[in-house]
Amino acid sequence: MTGAGGELGPLLRGRARQEGLAPALAGLHAELSPRAPHHGPTGFAVVPAELAGGGAERTERLPGGAVAVLRGRPGAEPEGWGEAVVWLRLGCSEALREAAVRYLGERTSGDSALLHRQLVRAQLAEALTGQLEVRAVLGRDEPRTAGDLTHAHDRLGAADRGLARLLGASGYLLGGPGHVADVSALLAAAYAHPEGP
């Protein structure tokens, strides 16, 4: 594998989308921080539970495996880490969109699926637009700035919140797609750099 902008980023995206957050996080750590979990600028790390070593602040049980939140000292960021986290979150967000489309296609109001309602379609389109914007930023040839990545995290967070609402109460169940979106937001909180463009 190469850097986050090469093969690693799209691989993490696909793994998060198809297998879940924990397997994608395992791949991220294996490639960019194999010796120890990487703690972001806030001092927190989000890792597959098997890397926590019993020192987890909390553990989240998700489809695909459990994820742990660790507290420690901020560490030097491995090259490509920030961009790789955005790729991973993009995959999670796309999986959430797919879950919302399935859910809405199965639910009816009157004689038609909720998926065909204009307001619902507008909300799905807004989420998709945010995801496509993030893909465009990640796909550019020029390097991404901290500001680009922060904006990408913000767009994914907004898309995920809208998609979770479309899932109704099921979007807020532990272990469900909305729960994955909440843990994805923890990744942004742990690893995004709020300062600077």
Image (cartoon, rainbow, N blue to C red):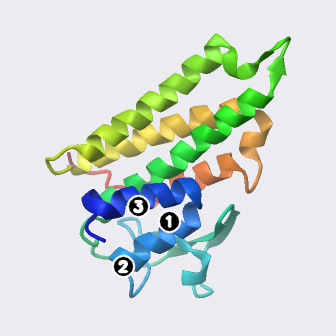
**Viewer-nearest of labels 2 and 1?**
1
Look at the numbered discs 2 and 1 and tell me whether their residues touch, using CB distance below 8 Å.
no
Q: Which residue is mark 1?
A: 24
User: Mark 3: which secondary structure?
Assistant: helix
**Viewer-nearest of labels 2 and 3?**
3
The residue under label 2 is which amino acid type? Ser
Looking at the rendered image, the quarter that the N terminus falls into is bottom left
Q: 59 above or below 182?
A: below
Q: Which residue is mark 3?
A: 11
> Percent from the top left, x then y, of residue 10?
37, 56
Look at the numbered discs 3 and 1 and tell me whether their residues touch, using CB distance below 8 Å.
no
Q: 25 above or below 51?
A: above
Quadrant housing residue 29? bottom left
Residue drawn at x 64%, y 20% as measured from the top left: 120
Quadrant housing residue 113? top right
- Of callouts 2 and 1, the N-terminal one: 1
The image's mark for residue 33 is: 2
Q: From the viewer's perspective, is 192 left or right of 156?
A: left
- Mark 3 Cα shell of 10 Å, populated few (<14), some (14-19), many (≥20): many
Q: Nearer the viewer, residue 121 or 169?
A: 121
Q: Nearer the viewer, residue 44 or 52?
A: 52
Q: CA distance from mark 2 to mark 1?
A: 13 Å
- Of callouts 3 and 1, the N-terminal one: 3
Looking at the rendered image, the quarter that the C terminus falls into is top left
Residue drawn at x 49%, y 25% as measured from the top left: 126
- Mark 1 Cα shell of 10 Å, populated few (<14), some (14-19), many (≥20): many
Does any portion of residue 73 appear in the rendered image?
Answer: no
- Of callouts 2 and 3, the N-terminal one: 3
User: Mark 1: which secondary structure?
Assistant: helix
The residue under label 3 is which amino acid type? Leu
Residue drawn at x 62%, y 53% as measured from the top left: 180
